[in-house]
């Protein structure tokens, strides 16, 4: 990444912090606005790419990071904090499907870190899907904790029961299948190296 791209990434992360602060102010001012989950995720998740780079000793391209930050803005700020999950039809399932594709990158970078280039494609495919499902289940646990401990309704348990959670996991699984298929093709690594 060059200096301009790095500056753009830092500016985007700063915008997430500013948005989280604004939503936090709204939580404090408006007792009916309970979006703690969006604020917590909005402060932590923008720093996931540098954590992955540090843990996996890898480089995440500028293009991939931009896609990730656009996804985060749509999922967290529009979805949670501005209630698109409740007002836009199928928004929730589209986001979980997209998260399956994006979290496949975490599995891909895990494979790179463990240097399993010569592993069979089937193993790589299953590894990536497993990581995606771990991410999806982790997110559902986060939603559950926000509902139970912060009084939110992220899982919409009152209106739809466990259907919401199960359909979210299924959407993430379908997305992970597509992500794993893309990331286990021979040309995928070359595409990442272009940036």
Image (cartoon, grey):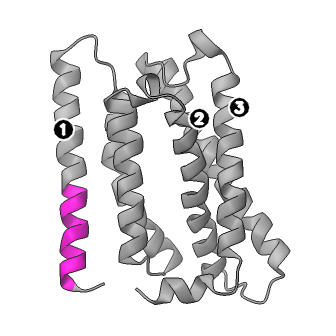
Residue under pointer 3? 166
Residue plotted at (55% across, 51% down):
99
Where is residue 75, by image quadrant? top left
Residue under pointer 2? 141
Q: Secondary structure at mark 1?
A: helix
Rounded to the nearest angstrom, the CA distance separating label 3 from label 2 is: 12 Å
Judge the density around disc 2: few (<14), some (14-19), many (≥20) Cα neighbours within 10 Å.
some
With 96 as the anchor, is 87 left or right in this view?
left
With 24 as the anchor, is 96 left or right in this view?
right
Depth check: give the residue in front, 166 or 106: 166
Rounded to the nearest angstrom, the CA distance separating label 1 from label 2 is: 24 Å
Point out the stretch of residues depicted in magenta. 3-14
With 77 as the anchor, is 123 left or right in this view?
right
Residue under pointer 1? 21
Residues at circles 3 and 1 in contact by the CB criterion of under 8 Å: no
Q: Quadrant of the N terminus?
A: bottom left
- Give coordinates of residue 6: x percent, y percent: 24, 76
Disc nearer the start of the sequence (1/2): 1
Judge the density around disc 3: few (<14), some (14-19), many (≥20) Cα neighbours within 10 Å.
few
Disc nearer the start of the sequence (3/1): 1
Q: Nearer the viewer, mark 3 or mark 1?
A: 3
- Give coordinates of residue 169: x percent, y percent: 68, 40
Depth check: give the residue in front, 194 or 135: 194
Residue plotted at (59% across, 85% down):
189
- Give coordinates of residue 150: x percent, y percent: 41, 20
């Amino acid at each position: 990444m060059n200096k301009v791209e790095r500056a753009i990434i830092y500016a985007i992360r700063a915008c997430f912090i500013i948005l989280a602060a604004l939503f936090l102010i709204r939580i404090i001012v408006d007792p009916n606005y309970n979006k703690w989950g969006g604020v917590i995720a909005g402060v932590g998740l923008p720093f996931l790419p540098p954590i992955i780079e540090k843990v996996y000793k890898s480089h995440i391209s500028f293009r991939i990071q931009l896609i990730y930050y656009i996804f985060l803005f749509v999922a967290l700020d529009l979805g949670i904090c501005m209630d698109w999950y409740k007002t836009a039809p199928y928004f929730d399932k589209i986001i979980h499907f997209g998260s399956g594709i994006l979290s496949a990158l975490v599995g891909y970078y895990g494979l790179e870190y463990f240097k399993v280039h010569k592993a069979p494609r089937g193993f790589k495919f299953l590894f990536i899907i497993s990581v995606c499902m771990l991410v999806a289940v982790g997110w559902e646990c986060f939603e559950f904790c926000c509902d139970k401990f912060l009084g939110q309704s992220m899982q919409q348990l009152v209106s739809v029961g466990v259907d919401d959670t199960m359909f979210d996991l299924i959407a993430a699984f379908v997305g992970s299948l597509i992500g794993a298929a893309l990331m286990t093709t021979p040309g995928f690594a070359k595409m990442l190296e272009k940036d």
